Image (cartoon, rainbow, N blue to C red):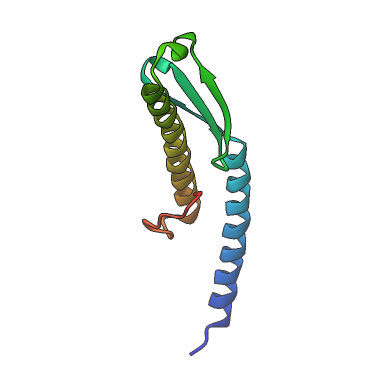
């Protein structure tokens, strides 16, 4: 049997959740996440869209060999991206009440 009032209530909740998700996504997009290599020789900054926005290099960076330079950059960028993804997942789960479960959505 079709329960029209219940269905309308569910649709209204879905619309509210959609609005809230958009609001949270905009908030996340404006956030800044930093990742650090050993001794903060490299500090990478990404935004909530997972775009690399800045890399700061300590003066001692130039003293490293090429292999370590690459490694330090990779570590810093990966840490910043990981932090952004974790924060996004937590904020989205708070809005959806865990409805997304353990879904790993790229960029979220």
Which residue lies at the image location 57% right of the left edge and 43% below the top edge? 49
User: Which image quadrant is residue 98 in?
Assistant: bottom left
Q: Residue furthest bottom?
A: 1
Q: Compared with residue 50, is residue 95 higher up or lower down, i.e. above or below?
A: below
Residue 45 lies, in percent from the top left, at 53, 29
Residue 5 lies, in percent from the top left, at 58, 77
User: Which image quadrant is residue 40 in?
Assistant: top left
Q: Compared with residue 49, is residue 61 higher up or lower down, i.e. above or below?
A: above
Q: Is residue 102 left or right of residue 53?
A: left
Query: Relative to the observer, which residue lies in front, 33 or 58?
Result: 58
Q: Residue furthest front?
A: 66
Which residue lies at the image location 48% right of the left edge and 52% below the top edge? 106
Residue 32 lies, in percent from the top left, at 56, 31
Query: Relative to the observer, which residue lies in front, 85 or 96?
Result: 85
User: Which image quadrant is residue 85 in?
Assistant: top left
Q: Is residue 48 left or right of residue 73?
A: right
Query: Relative to the observer, which residue lies in front, 76 or 21?
Result: 76
């Amino acid at each position: 049997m079709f329960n029209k009032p219940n269905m309308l209530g569910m649709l209204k909740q879905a619309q509210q959740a959609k609005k809230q998700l958009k609001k949270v996504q905009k908030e996340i997009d404006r956030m800044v996440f930093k990742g650090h290599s050993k001794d903060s020789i490299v500090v990478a900054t990404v935004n909530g869209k997972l775009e690399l926005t800045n890399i700061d290099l300590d003066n001692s960076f130039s003293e490293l060999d090429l292999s370590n330079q690459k490694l330090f950059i990779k570590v810093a960028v990966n840490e910043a991206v990981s932090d952004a993804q974790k924060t996004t997942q937590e904020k989205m789960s708070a809005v959806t009440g865990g409805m997304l479960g353990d879904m790993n959505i790229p960029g979220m």
